[in-house]
Amino acid sequence: MRDGRFITFEGIDGSGKSTQARLLHAALTARGVDAVLTREPGGAPGAEDIRRLLVEGDPDRWSPETEILLFTAARRDHLEKTIEPALVKGKTVVSDRFADSTRVYQGAARGELRELVDRLHEMAIGREPDMTLVIDMEPEEALRRGLARASGEDRFEDMGLDFQQRLREGFLTLAHDHPDRCRVIDGNRPEDAVAGDVLAAVLGSE
Ligand SMILES: Nc1ncnc2c1ncn2[C@@H]1O[C@H](COP(=O)(O)OP(=O)(O)OP(=O)(O)O)[C@@H](O)[C@H]1O
Ligand SMILES: [Mg+2]
């Protein structure tokens, strides 16, 4: 059996990744595609335990290096327990964030961390998505949406607008550097309009 497709959503906080991942999963399922919806950090029981260590508590709880190790540990568990078993069965995997988030967030926090992220990825993960949808939008609008939620998981959002602006640039640079797998989608439109472009990009690249 042919391996399934691995599709990821990336973008700044509140840009609509979770919304669009859910809508894409529903649209694919409605078309008869066997699809799995998952997320990072998390996506497997052990990785969800690590998620709680990462997203709750004081912004200075972990050093940037420790944080990268925790993200990588969670990603390895997610890959082993959820992503690879589904792909091997021919299922499509839709993940709300993956390795690009670590590249961009840690790179935006401190540029020299990018090498640590890349080396750990190469050694412990070694897998890229087949397609990455980068949901792009103004940080002001995205932050307003995100703060309206009060989920208790706002450790990253608390880092402020300047940081979100660096993240936006980081995701756009990444998309520019990986045109083979990345598509930039304008997220500052109604959900259905964004979802239409996402589905067209996914079906168009089959
Ligand atoms: N196209 C849209 N227009 C208006 N509001 C939207 C749109 N898409 C999502 N929202 C709303 O904005 C908020 C953030 O959306 P969502 O949770 O999907 O973003 P996210 O990128 O997953 O955020 P985070 O990075 O914090 O996980 C939610 O309240 C959601 O209902
Ligand atoms: Mg989300």
Image (cartoon, helix red, strand yellow):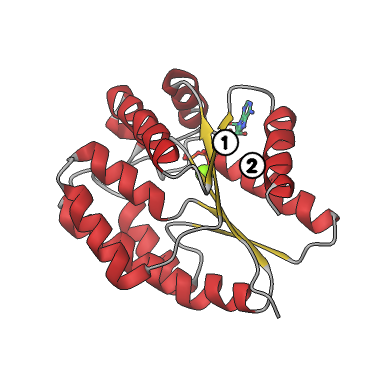
Determine whether the beta carbon of the residue marked 2 sits less than 8 angstroms from the nearest atom of ligand 1: yes
Three-letter code, disc 2: Gln
Q: Which mark is residue 35?
A: none
Q: Estimate the x, y position of residue 159 in percent, counting from the top left.
A: 28, 32
Describe residue 156's horizontal placement relative to residue 135 as left or right. left
Residue that numbered label 2 is attached to = 20
Q: Determine the secondary structure under disc 1.
A: loop
- Which quadrant of the picture is home to ligand 1? top right
Describe residue 88's horizontal placement relative to residue 174 as left or right. right
- Residues 175 and 99: in front is 175
Picture quarter containing residue 34? bottom right
Q: Who's the residue at 45% across and 62% down the image?
A: 42
Three-letter code, disc 1: Gly
Q: Estimate the x, y position of residue 143 in percent, counting from the top left.
A: 44, 26
Picture quarter containing residue 29? bottom right
Query: Crowding at label 1, few (<14), some or many (≥20) Cα neighbours within 10 Å?
Result: many
Work out which quarter of the rendered image holds the N terminus and state it.
bottom right
Residue at the right extreme?
A: 31
Q: Who's the residue at 47% across and 38% down the image?
A: 11
Residue that numbered label 1 is attached to = 16
Query: From this viewpoint, is residue 22 visible?
Result: yes
Q: Determine the secondary structure under disc 2.
A: helix
- The span from disc 2 to disc 1 (Cα, nearest Å) is 6 Å
Determine whether the beta carbon of the residue marked 1 sits less than 8 angstroms from the nearest atom of ligand 1: yes
Residue at the front extreme?
A: 180
Q: Are marks 2 and 1 in contact (CB under 8 Å)?
A: yes
